[in-house]
Image (cartoon, grey):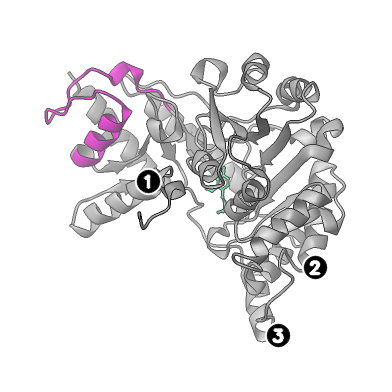
Amino acid sequence: MAFLSDTLSRVKPSPTIAVTTKAKELKAAGRDVIGLGAGEPDFDTPDNIKQAGIRAIEEGQTKYTAVDGTPELKQAIAAKFARENGLDYAPSQITVGSGGKQVIYNAFMATLNPGDEVIIPAPYWVSYPDMVLLAGGEPVIVEAGIDTGFKLTADALEAAITPRTKWFLFNSPSNPTGAAYSAEELKALTDVLMRHPDVWVLSDDMYEHLVFDNFVFATPAQVEPGLKDRTLTMNGVSKAYAMTGWRIGYAGGPEQLIKAMGKVQSQSTSNPCSISQAAAVEALNGTQEFIRPNQALFKRRRDLVVAGLNACPGIDCPVPEGAFYVYPSVAGCIGKTSAQGAEIADDEAFATALLEEEGVAVVFGAAFGLSPHFRVSYATSDKALEEACNRIKRFCERLT
Ligand SMILES: Cc1ncc(COP(=O)(O)O)c(C=O)c1O
């Protein structure tokens, strides 16, 4: 009898974590490594939010809370959805988990039966297909490549829908490309979904506040209110408020689904950390004044990285609308040989040789389901980004 479950054998460990670990190992061995793999802001949680966490400890908010979120936090989330997205969710239509990741996982665990399909546009956040597999479903990967600005077309979505489709998983702005759909672009997709009443929509809005150049964020239930009864609008405080370590994510959706997700959570982790929930109330209800300066900071870095990468022979880097990632193509480097003799057969070989020869850690595109690309996270200092771009340029110039 096998000790490990058959389900686990369908799943692979996170490649982004593998790259970060490899970069750390090289650093520990004394190598000068610039890490562009991490998916989190490089600065601290704002002080007003930290103080709310400290107050929660001092006031003794250290006990179990309601499984899927305190009434205070649910109120704050309902107010956020109304204020920022024009979406009206009652507290009973809101769930809170230990990070956005757990919220998505709960949704799949609560709804997927063997053979149920989940449409995932590629490139995708690495965890999506594996979470579907863990929950017993079938990921259906649909390519949204560089030619369409990494955005899924209405025709591609229509063609992917089958009688087994349970969910369409939508992520804008996207990890790993930074591409974000305007309301008009999104409407083309919601029009397709309106013709398929059995398909549910999971919208991962995690990077909502990281958009540039006056881009206006839009989410499916807002663009097409007719979809609200079968949409789970998921978001969190991790990226917008630099709170990745606090582990708070949330979603709004139909009560029956929200209840089912709470049931999954009640038999796994119970409530998210009570202190983090109190801090998240302050994040959502308190001043939002650091969001704009953060957008300006990330926009400057995006421009720096896009210009730096487009100066590298063989690399083509589109300008994304949001998040803190770029997803350049390395099509012009494939088939070449590096200065130290590595064959650049694919994007994984490119990323491996780049790390070994120039000490720059990026995540190869195959990990996100679309090659030949790599992902750069520019949530790091200007100085590190400039140096990384110089090294990538030298690496590309030496390819023969
Ligand atoms: C697209 C996307 N969704 C969800 C998450 C999960 O966020 P959290 O840290 O709140 O679990 C991430 C984190 O990297 C992400 O990139």
The residue identified by callout 3 is 59
Residue at horizontal 43 percent and vertical 47 percent from the top: 6
Q: Residue 130 appears at what percent x and percent y?
A: 49, 43
- Badge 1 marks a residue whose secondary structure is helix
Q: Badge 2 local density, few (<14 within 10 Å), some, or many (20+)?
A: some
- Badge 2 marks a residue whose secondary structure is helix
The amino acid at mark 3 is Glu
The amino acid at mark 2 is Glu
Q: Gap in Å between the C-alphas at discs 3 and 1? A: 42 Å
The amino acid at mark 1 is Lys
Q: Is residue 66 magenta?
A: no
Front-most of 6 and 344? Answer: 6
Q: Which residues are magenta?
A: 328-356
365 sits to left or right of 115: left
Q: Earlier in the sequence, mark 2 or mark 3?
A: 3
Front-most of 249 and 146? Answer: 249
Report which quarter residue 148 is drawn in. top right
The residue identified by callout 2 is 72
Identify the image quadrant of the C terminus.
top left
Q: Residue 27 appears at what percent x and percent y?
A: 24, 55
The residue identified by callout 1 is 383
Q: Residue 21 appears at what percent x and percent y?
A: 32, 53
Asked if the residue at label 1 sits under 8 Å from ligand 1, the reply is: no
394 sits to left or right of 8: left
